[in-house]
Image (cartoon, grey):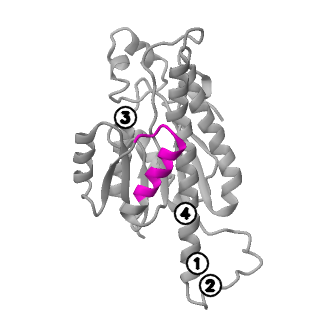
Amino acid sequence: MSGFSLDLTGRVALVTGGSRGIGAATVRLLRLSGARVAFSFRAAAEQAAALAAECGGPDHCVAIRQELASAADGEALVQSAVHAFGRLDSLIVNHGVWPPHDAPIGVMSDAQWQSTLAINLHSVFGLVRAAVAQMDAQTNAQAAALPAAQNTTPDPASSNIAPLRGHIVLISSTAGQRGEAFHADYATTKGALISLTKSLSSELAPRGFRVNCVAPGWVATEMSAAALTDPVRGPRIASAIPVGRAGSVEEIAAPIVFLCTPHAAFISGEILNVNGGAVLVG
């Protein structure tokens, strides 16, 4: 009996916001699974270069500097990833902004609202649109290249089952499920990603795509360090998590990678809560 494997050899993945935190952990696990990986970064150039080198260098892992604040930005990133590796099999949308200061809705600026939506939502539209188009094109090209004996009409019993074209994993948050006071902009975008996951699954699953969502709770990252280490706020956060602690980046990355493997081929439109039991949403 052979061992259980999450082998992604021959596959190409694109991870947005991949230079640190959950994104970097996801890049590492994808490489350990055999995938070639492109990942985006905005400002952390040294961290991005070090991660790409650690994961095998340009033949196996590339870092792409790309702002993600519009649909056009998202499309440009997909094009860069395909240029690097020739195809795309998995898109992991991990980037996002969480303005750290409290902003009551009565005084939240137009600029903050528009910026958060542009980064966390508008760019996602461009990423998904371009990724679906690329995965469609490469699957159709592969089918056309098959020998005539293999490129025949399937039997009627299976003619409605499309070949697997690719995986899309959107990263939401518990804030998108229960809201977050003083961060309505962020919570709104993360809630929208949950709705987008379900809409895309309904549309794309019959065509061979698997679209799912991972919704983390508190995770120990650079972004959350100030809150988690605060002597007052930190224990209060931990006490609201049934397992008693924040998650690690690897504990979020592992479910993400699993959703990009053939073992997840019967999972579509799922919102996978990875939050230590803090928010229980069906």
The span from disc 3 to disc 1 (Cα, nearest Å) is 41 Å
Task: Residue under label 1, please give it.
Answer: 143
Whether residue 205 can be seen here: yes
Q: Which amino acid does label 2 sit on?
A: Asn
Image quadrant in which you'd find residue 281: top right
Q: In this view, does 117 lie above or below 268?
A: above
Q: For residue 151, which numbered disc appears in the image? A: 2
Instruction: Look at the numbered discs 4 and 2 and tell me whether their residues touch, using CB distance below 8 Å.
Output: no
Q: For residue 135, which numbered disc appears in the image? A: 4
Q: Give the range drawn in magenta.
A: 67-81
Quadrant of the frame with the C terminus: top right
The span from disc 2 to disc 1 (Cα, nearest Å) is 7 Å
Instruction: Look at the numbered discs 1 and 4 and tell me whether their residues touch, using CB distance below 8 Å.
Output: no
Task: Residue under label 3, please give it.
Answer: 248
Quadrant of the frame with the N terminus: bottom left
Q: Closest to the observer: 5 or 44?
A: 44
Q: What residue type is labelled 3?
A: Ser
Q: For residue 79, which numbered disc appears in the image? A: none
Mark 3 or mark 4: name the one nearer the start of the chain. 4
Mark 1 or mark 4: name the one nearer the start of the chain. 4
Q: What residue type is labelled 1?
A: Ala
Q: Is residue 207 above or below residue 106?
A: below
